[in-house]
Amino acid sequence: TKEHLKRIERNTETIIKNRAYLLSGDEQKAKLAADINRALEAANRKRLAAVFGGLMNRGYVKIWRKSLDNGIISNPQLLQFWVWCLLKASHRKHKQMVGFQEVALDAGQFIFGRRKAASELNLSEQSIRSCLKSLKINQQITIKVTNKYSIITIVNWNTYQQDDDKANQQSNQQSNQQSTSNQPAINQQSTTNKNGKNVKNGENGKKDPPTPQKPERQKKPFTPPTELEVVRYFQENGYSVAIAKKAFTYYHVAGWKDSAGKPVKNWKQKMIAVWFKDENKSKSDTPKQPSLEEVMS
């Protein structure tokens, strides 16, 4: 309080006077002078603690690094006004008197006056208008205007200015709720399995034999087709012999690897995916079995 600070000031002045007197004396008073110096330092610490303690009790706001992305940091006046808005906003619901009218404010809101803002920030009213317009465009604030006053609302105040303790508490609650909601299903499934085993054991009087495991399916090794097989497969699906030969030659020369160097596992699927195109269709719609001469030519 102010009275407490004044009392500290008077004690400090007295200590300074005594110290000046003692320093002018002989060496026998040096010890007492040292004690007074320590008392003076303690008084100064108390005075600073009283001053800064009063400021700390007013709380704080968070400045998120997201401000670096929206261009605020590059505009000194806009940054100054934005921080001022954050500091002005209420951290909780309360009622404020405006003239003879009581106004209810939510967290993140405050009563705004353009002239007062210009005076406190040492900016022109035109600069204040420009800052308001910019923050409104960026959807960082909203303004409710009446004939007597205006209310500025910080958008997403509760999201960005929520207390750390509350945020951690909500996060823990959500995690606990999710864990608790999953637990009954797990318990029910476990109980059902146990009951099922008991019923079977009661009926048969024996434990159920273990379920035999299915043998793993062995993959068949890839066998490259002959040129005749490729040609016939193309013709059966209405594609030309020339394209079939071209496709066979492409993969045969490459050791039956595709363009990415991966081995071909199913040559029919590869033909469908790569070569079965409209422009490769045979002019005749009737499938024709190629002769041996056609294949080998």
Image (cartoon, helix red, strand yellow):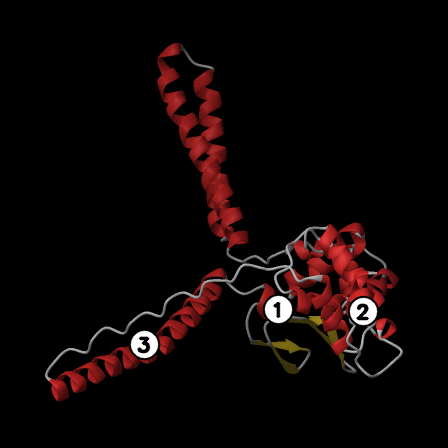
Residue found at x 47% / y 38%: 45
Q: In the image, 49: left or right of 147?
A: left
- The residue that disc 1 covers is 157
In the picture as drawn, the residue positioned furthest to the left comes out as 205
* Badge 2 amino acid: Ile
Q: Are marks 3 and 2 in contact (CB under 8 Å)?
A: no
Image x and y of residue 17, in percent: 48, 27
Residue found at x 50% / y 62%: 219
What is the spatial separation of the Cα atoms under label 3 and label 2, in whole angstroms? 50 Å
* Badge 3 amino acid: Ile
| Nearest the eye: 157 or 35 | 157
Disc on the earlier residue, 3 or 1 = 1
Is residue 255 visible to us here?
yes
The kind of secondary structure element at disc 1 is helix
Q: In the image, 77: left or right of 83?
A: right
Dot label at residue 186: 3
In the picture as drawn, the residue positioned furthest to the bottom comes out as 203
Classify mark 1: residues with Cα within 10 Å, few (<14), some (14-19) or many (20+): some
Classify mark 2: residues with Cα within 10 Å, few (<14), some (14-19) or many (20+): few
| Nearest the eye: 36 or 154 | 154
- The residue that disc 2 covers is 137
Of circles 3 and 1, the one toward us is: 3
Q: Specify the quadrant that holds the C terminus.
A: bottom right
Image x and y of residue 31, in percent: 36, 18
Does 115 sit above or below residue 63? below
